[in-house]
Image (cartoon, rainbow, N blue to C red):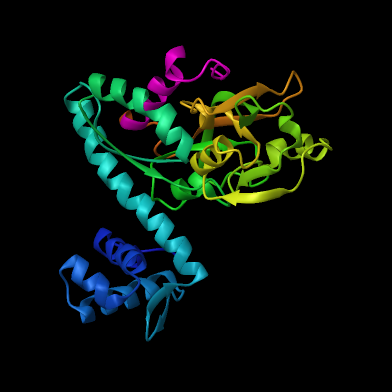
Amino acid sequence: MARTADSDLAPHELRVVVAVADAGGFSAAAGALGLTQSAVSHSVRGSERKIGAVLFERGRTGARPTPAGEKAVAYARRVLRLLDVLTAEARGAARPGPAEGPLRIAAFRSAALHLLPPVLQRLRARHPGIEPRVRIVREVGRGTAGEVADGKADMGIATLGGSVPLPPGLVAGGLLEEPYALVHAAGHADPRSLPLVDWAENCGSYTRDWWAAQDWIPMATVEAEDDGAVLSLVGGGHGMAIMPALSLVGAPDSVEITDLGPGRPTRRVGYVTTTELAGSAVVRALVRELRNRRTTDAPEVLGPHDG
């Protein structure tokens, strides 16, 4: 059956779908949008009728997206963001100048702390109209790439080459190869004899083969919340850890960093964005700054970007 204009979702309908998903219910979404609950319910029913699928499971505790709803919400976010970009890009074409507008970035903790700050400083110096908004996301499961795919971020600073494939519709670019090192309390005579301290985001598939071949590495006896907690525990003499270079920027004097040698594992760090946003002025500006970052932006052990 041929599509008609009446079967397309209007921007206001997309906003309602996203608001219900974000708020977790029709009543809360109505309050956020300044609408009545009946108006929100009517809008969602209309969207479901146009799409031909139920988007939300209704219950006493609120509304939760169905599998179809999760897809619809993700694309609704991306479409709404493109409408914003359309305006900004058209204005930029009419009045050429520095890029401007919001730029939503999802990054894992060590990248947000140590890679992004000098890059964003130079970005804002060259493009004062850009408004970066950085959100730290745990790099487990779908991680930062999932945030981009779901329309919650324009760009993600991500670990590339893992076992989880890149979601459809995304493009990626490499920035650096991040080597791992052995970290232990300063002055310890035999750090490899210590128990292992680890955290959930560490040791993805890019290090798994190397890890499995090391018979001196025990099972983790201490699981920490993040790499900062790992450093604190290691510095306090509670064990040793194997950590990537970005996590070791500004490591305290209480820890010692030992090179794992030429066969050491590495973690590839890069960026991901959508095919639609890859050509936008704000994303292109950030990619340029990431690729042109100075060697002083990160520790010497980090490798160069992929170009």
Q: Residue at x 74, y 40 (%)?
A: 208
On the image, the x and y values in percent for residue 193 come to 76, 36
Magenta residue check for 303? yes
Side of 55 relative to 238 (left or right)? left
On the image, the x and y values in percent for residue 223 come to 61, 51
Q: Residue lying farthest bottom?
A: 60
Give the total of numbered labels: 0
Chain part drawn in magenta: 282-307
Side of 305 relative to 37 (left or right)? right
Residue 105 found in image quarter: top left
Name above or below for residue 176 compared with residue 48. Answer: above
Residue 210 found in image quarter: top right
Name above or below for residue 55 compared with residue 92. Answer: below
Q: Residue lying farthest top?
A: 295
Q: Residue at x 37, y 44 (%)?
A: 135
On the image, the x and y values in percent for residue 165 come to 63, 45
